[in-house]
Image: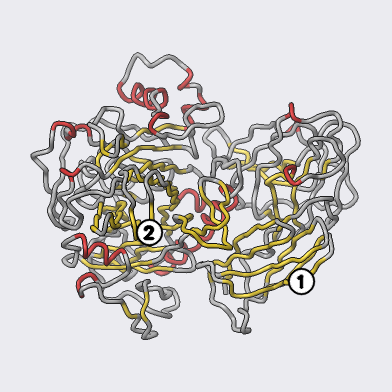
């Protein structure tokens, strides 16, 4: 599918001093000349898959400010219909500067302006401060390599977006310096909250925080969970030249799922998920099978945390941790925040209409920061009631930002649709688990490869199945859709895996006869149930760095790839094998054989799991080892290993119990290995 940005015959601008109900859309007549209405990008949307969603350069998404399709609703599902799952959504920020509370937001009016900051303040608007949109299929067809089209407006604008890609403002590029296209469509824009004259929404403050936001959105035209997902990355930079303390970042939504007045909302703390679903199976617009829609947190902002490790800008940062969703709040039409303090209370998970009082879970009687964290599919726990026109806010915080500090946050807008309103919640949560695993597999490795690459770049004839004694052929399941595969080595010998085996690739690039720490490849797979839990990029060691002495190769991995037709629909599967280097001597490690000089921590098996899971690891030398289990907040709940261990491969079993022997709840957990200066943490999912 290709999104063509259309020219509006007219553009409406919006201004309200309080939150307006969906039925009302106000114009803003008095914009300064530096931000004329036509310079606000109300026209760009992402539509690579089953979701069509508007993205603006003022902080809002899933909101059609210009009523391009005849209404302001901004997320259409399924794509190609007039059905909408979100009316409006946007980024909200709150924090304190010198003790003064400041709040910026994208609601029905916006307190952000397009463009980057300079000299601690905003810049006058320019044409290039727009939402850029680039296409995978246009790149592959050679469209971007051709001269600028002689006509027409649509084609010229598509060509211009690629060739005017604003690298100087922070737009991402690939290794060749070309615009980085992730998935099938990539959108990018930059905006900031430093212009005081846009701070007219009474839910915000009269001044901004001085934060620049670089926003990337992308999506994949693939079946399954990826086809119901739009990925969103936010880079926040404090360019206001003042310290920001006790800062919160929120994703706000007025969902209006189908009909306006029959919505419920909920949160799942184990999945870092906030969502909306229909109160019954009979929706006025969707009918008997209304979908569920939500925001799925993939990576939160980082805060100092001794003994922890955080993912930040593609690398692991010791001494920090990623914040999970820290609050989830709901309010209804008519109880919108009336001032910055009420907004900030909502961000903190407090009752803004009761002077910031704490919220109590009526089922447990305990104070909570997460409203409606029960399970609608089973009826257990605290559930929403009395359906109406809902708003919800998913937040992170608090954290501090000094001048020039940068935060990176990833989330996904996801949709699930089953046979009724409750099975849609199950579908949504299943999509959440799948997307989080895809994100973990693809983005927690140094290369930061495109998350939904699904193209065959190596012809099947270049690969062959070797005849090795200790191998087993594992065909893929028919509905298995791989995530990514890039083969950077070129020769063709390999080893295969049996079900349950784990694999990692090592290359002795300097030919010294040992696998040094820097020669570990960021690749690991686990064969589960006849398929492979994840596909990976194998060793990306440039050929020029290899020598004829590079013969000691632990060829110990396998991955699977979808072959697609001209329309990029799956038609067959190709098993690609990690190739050996050169044609001299090489070494296949048998399953479980230790590689000299290497520490590693494998993906637990099974994952997700019910009740018990096995964690395998290897030690390069004898020494003290700790293997611990942590909850989603980073708290250590169990020690599996704390003793001296010999070099070699080892295993530990976690029985899903804490240190007191009590069974823990379903959700996301982490396990961390520390040995000989090596520290690594991985995620696992317990599903009872």
Q: Position of residue 680 (x, y in %)?
A: 65, 57
Residue 334 drawn above or below residue 466: below
Which residue matches tag 1? Answer: 643
Residue name at image x 31 percent, y 37 percent: 117
Q: Indicate the position of residue 305 as horizontal and vertical percent values.
A: 52, 62
Question: Which residue is rendered at x = 63% and y = 69% of the image?
Answer: 609
Query: As displayed, is residue 229 above or below residue 324?
Result: above
Where is residue 212? Give x, y as percent: 33, 42
Residue lying furthest front in this view?
Answer: 98
Q: Quadrant of the N terminus?
A: top left
On the question of residue 379 being in view, the answer is yes
Circle 2 is placed at which residue position? 293
Quadrant position of residue 86: bottom left
What's the image's color scheme?
Answer: secondary structure
Q: Earlier in the sequence, mark 1 or mark 2?
A: 2
Residue 490's place in the image compared with 245, above or below, is above
Q: Residue at x 83, y 41 (%)?
A: 553
Relative to 430, 506 lies left or right: right
In depth, the one of 618 and 54 nearer the eye is 618
**Quadrant hosting residue 519:** top right
Residue occupying the point 81% across, 37% down: 580
Closer to viewer: mark 1 or mark 2: 1
């Amino acid at each position: 599918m290709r999104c063509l940005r259309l020219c509006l015959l007219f553009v409406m601008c919006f201004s309200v001093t309080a939150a307006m109900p969906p039925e009302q859309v106000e114009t803003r007549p008095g914009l300064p000349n530096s931000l004329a209405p036509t310079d606000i990008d109300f026209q760009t949307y992402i539509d690579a898959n089953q979701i069509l969603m508007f993205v603006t350069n003022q902080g809002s998404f899933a909101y059609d400010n210009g009523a391009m399709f005849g209404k302001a609703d901004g997320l259409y599902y399924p794509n190609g219909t007039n059905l909408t799952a979100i009316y409006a959504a946007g980024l909200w920020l709150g924090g304190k500067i010198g003790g003064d509370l400041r709040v910026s937001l994208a609601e029905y009016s916006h307190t952000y302006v397009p463009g980057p900051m300079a000299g601690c303040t905003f810049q006058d608007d320019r044409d290039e401060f727009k939402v850029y949109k680039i296409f995978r299929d246009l790149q592959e067809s050679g469209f971007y390599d051709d001269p600028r089209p002689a006509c027409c407006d649509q084609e010229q604008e598509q060509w211009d977006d690629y060739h005017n890609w604003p690298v100087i403002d922070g737009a991402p590029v690939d290794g060749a310096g070309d615009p980085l296209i992730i998935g099938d469509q990539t959108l990018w824009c930059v905006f900031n909250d430093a212009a005081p004259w846009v701070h007219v929404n009474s839910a915000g403050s009269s001044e901004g925080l001085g934060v620049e936001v670089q926003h990337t959105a992308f999506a994949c035209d693939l079946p399954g969970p990826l086809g119901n997902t739009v990925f969103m990355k936010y880079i926040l930079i404090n360019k206001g030249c003042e310290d920001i303390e006790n800062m919160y970042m929120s994703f706000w939504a007025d969902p209006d799922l189908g009909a306006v007045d029959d919505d419920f909302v909920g949160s799942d703390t184990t999945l870092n998920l906030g969502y909306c679903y229909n109160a019954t199976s009979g929706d006025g617009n969707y009918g008997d099978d209304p979908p569920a829609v939500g925001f799925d947190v993939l990576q939160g902002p980082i805060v100092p945390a001794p003994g922890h490790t955080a993912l930040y800008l593609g690398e692991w940062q010791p001494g920090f941790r990623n914040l999970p969703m820290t609050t989830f709040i709901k309010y209804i039409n008519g109880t919108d925040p009336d001032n910055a303090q009420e907004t900030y209370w909502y961000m903190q998970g407090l009752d803004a209409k009761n002077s910031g009082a704490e919220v109590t879970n009526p089922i447990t009687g305990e104070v909570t920061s997460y409203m409606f964290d029960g399970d609608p599919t089973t009826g257990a726990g605290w559930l929403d009631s009395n359906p109406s026109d809902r708003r919800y806010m998913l937040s992170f915080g608090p954290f501090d930002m000094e001048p020039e500090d940068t935060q990176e946050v990833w989330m996904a807008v996801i949709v699930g649709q089953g046979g009724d309103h409750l099975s849609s919640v199950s579908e949504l949560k299943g999509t959440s688990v799948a997307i989080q695993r895809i994100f973990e597999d693809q983005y927690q490795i140094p290369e930061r490869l495109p998350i939904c690459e699904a193209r065959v770049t190596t012809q099947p004839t270049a690969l062959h199945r070797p005849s090795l004694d200790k191998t087993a052929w594992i065909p893929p399941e028919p509905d298995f859709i791989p995530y990514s595969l890039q083969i950077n080595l070129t020769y063709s010998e390999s080893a295969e895996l049996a079900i349950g085996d784990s694999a990692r690739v090592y290359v002795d690039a300097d030919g010294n006869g040992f696998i040094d720490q820097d020669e570990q490849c960021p690749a690991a797979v686990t064969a589960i149930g006849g398929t492979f839990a994840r596909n990976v990029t194998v060793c990306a060691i440039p050929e020029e760095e290899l020598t004829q002495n590079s013969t000691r190769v632990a060829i110990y991995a396998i991955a699977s790839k979808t072959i697609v037709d001209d329309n990029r629909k799956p038609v067959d599967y190709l098993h690609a094998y990690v190739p050996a280097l050169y044609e001299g001597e090489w070494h296949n490690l048998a399953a479980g054989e230790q590689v000299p000089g290497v520490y590693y921590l494998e993906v637990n098996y099974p994952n997700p799991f019910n009740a018990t899971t096995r964690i395998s690891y290897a030690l390069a030398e004898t020494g003290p080892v700790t293997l611990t289990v942590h909850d989603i907040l980073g708290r250590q709940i169990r020690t599996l290993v704390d003793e001296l261990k010999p070099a070699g491969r080892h295993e530990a079993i976690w029985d899903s119990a804490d240190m007191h022997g009590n069974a823990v709840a379903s959700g996301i957990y982490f396990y961390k290995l520390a040995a000989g200066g090596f520290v690594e943490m991985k995620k696992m999912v317990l599903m009872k």
